[in-house]
Image: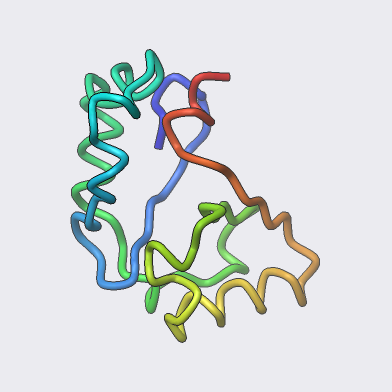
């Protein structure tokens, strides 16, 4: 999702489309150089606006699965498709990664 990272990424959310934004994440005090860069990244913003529904994602189709650390905030900890994806990735011994926030990941 971060175009400068050089990988072919896909973004998914429980319902697909633009996922909701945590209001605290958009407060001025939460902004960093990485979040500013993320907001200016047209490719990342387009990917975020057009996420795939989790019901259409299969762990077998990917080399790795990345999840935000605070899955409860996103509703992912209760979503049956999210749970199935995590369990499938784990059972297949796929790479399953947890990250703090996407903009901070892309800052690396």
Q: Position of residue 57 (x, y in %)?
A: 45, 70
What residue sits 44% from the left and 70% below the top? 76
Residue at the farthest right position: 93
User: So how many labels did they put on this image?
Assistant: 0
Up the image or down, 91 lies above or below 21; here it is below
Q: Is residue 14 left or right of residue 95?
A: left
What residue sits 46% from the left and 43% below the top? 9
Residue at the farthest front position: 29
For the N terminus, the quadrant is top left
Up the image or down, 54 lies above or below 12; here it is below
Q: Is residue 50 left or right of residue 65?
A: left
Residue at the farthest top position: 33
What residue sits 66% from the left and 78% below the top? 87
For the C terminus, the quadrant is top right
What residue sits 30% from the left and 33% below the top? 44
Residue 33: quarter of image: top left
Q: Position of residue 75 (x, y in %)?
A: 38, 71
Residue 35: quarter of image: top left
Residue at the farthest bottom position: 80
């Amino acid at each position: 999702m971060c175009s400068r990272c050089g990988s072919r990424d896909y973004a998914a959310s429980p319902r697909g489309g633009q996922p909701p934004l945590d209001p605290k994440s958009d407060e001025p005090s939460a902004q960093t150089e990485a979040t500013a860069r993320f907001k200016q990244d047209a490719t990342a913003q387009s990917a975020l606006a057009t996420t795939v529904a989790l019901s259409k994602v299969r762990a077998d189709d990917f080399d790795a699965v990345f999840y935000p650390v605070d899955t409860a905030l996103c509703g992912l900890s209760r979503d049956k498709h999210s749970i199935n994806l995590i369990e499938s990735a784990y059972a297949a011994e796929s790479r399953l990664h947890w990250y703090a926030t996407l903009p901070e990941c892309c800052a690396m």
